Amino acid sequence: MGTGTGIGRVRGLGSARHGTHHWIHQRITAAGNFVLVLAFIISLLRMQGLDYAGVTAWLSNPLVAVTMMLMVVSIFYHLRLGMQVMMEDYVHDEGLKFVSILILNFYAIGGAAAGIFAIAKIAFSGGAA
Amino acid sequence: MAISILHRVTGNGLATVGALALVWWLMAAATGPAAYDYFLSWARSPLGYVVAIGLTWAFFQHLLSGLRHFVLDMGAGYELKTNKSWSILIPVLSIFITAAIWLTICARNI
């Protein structure tokens, strides 16, 4: 960063600042995804088609709703960590990197919010919107 | 090497196309029958099926190579022969699983 002090020259460099934290959380959400997304895919296969009535009725079931919400959180948290690693690898311009990671975070949080809200709305309105 | 970049590519594909498709589906279902029908018109189009099959493959490829990461995390599987065998087997497995799932779906719908 700066040319003045020694610490000014090394600040912002080095490891990804929270390396271990990210690494562990990536594994945790990976395990979560493994269980939850596989369960989701199996559920989809067992559904008789993707019609509106069937899907909304299915999502209204409390157990399904909670599990789906957890899946949405796990997916977006996992993808946020994964895509950040990719950006840190390929984007070298500091300004562009900052903006990219900012947009990524907005996408992850926005996507999770949309997913959770949609499930909640379907579940609370009893499957008939 | 190839399996490593495949893990990244499938991950980012799932993160963008997959996550957006998931949220679109959920939001459409929450918005109402008209919005949901619009989603279905895309999902049941040829492009929709291509995307769905692609996402299925990407998911299982990412899952299997992710399991490979877990094994490597534990410190196992670094031997050259072992690593190479699994690196070849994993894409074969993911294609097989994808085919099995989609053939089941097609058989059910015919």
Image (cartoon, coloured by chain):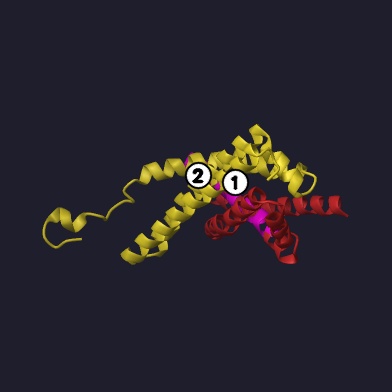
Chain colours: A yellow, B red
Q: Which residues are magenta?
A: B52-75
Q: Nearer the viewer, mark 2 or mark 1?
A: 1
Label 1 crowd bin: few (<14), some (14–19), many (20+), radius 10 Å: many
Percent coordinates x, y for residue B60 in the rendering: 64, 50
**Lateral position of residue A17 relative to residue A120, left or right:** left
Write down the chain letter for disc 1: A
Please, what is the three-letter code of the amino acid marked with disc 1?
Ala
In the image, farthest residue toward the right: B110
In 3D space, how far apart are the residues under numbered discs 2 and 1 (Cα atoms)?
A: 38 Å
Q: Which residue is mark 2?
A: B72
Q: Nearer the viewer, residue A9 or A76?
A: A76
Q: Going 74% across and 49% down the picture, which residue do you hit?
A: A52
Please, what is the three-letter code of the amino acid marked with disc 2?
Leu
Q: Which mark is residue A61?
A: none
Q: Nearer the viewer, residue A31 or A73?
A: A73
Label 2 crowd bin: few (<14), some (14–19), many (20+), radius 10 Å: few
Q: Going 85% across and 53% down the picture, which residue do you hit?
A: B109
Q: Which quarter of the image is occupied by the C terminus of chain B?
A: bottom right
Q: Which residue is mark 1?
A: A118
Percent coordinates x, y for residue B81 in the rendering: 57, 50
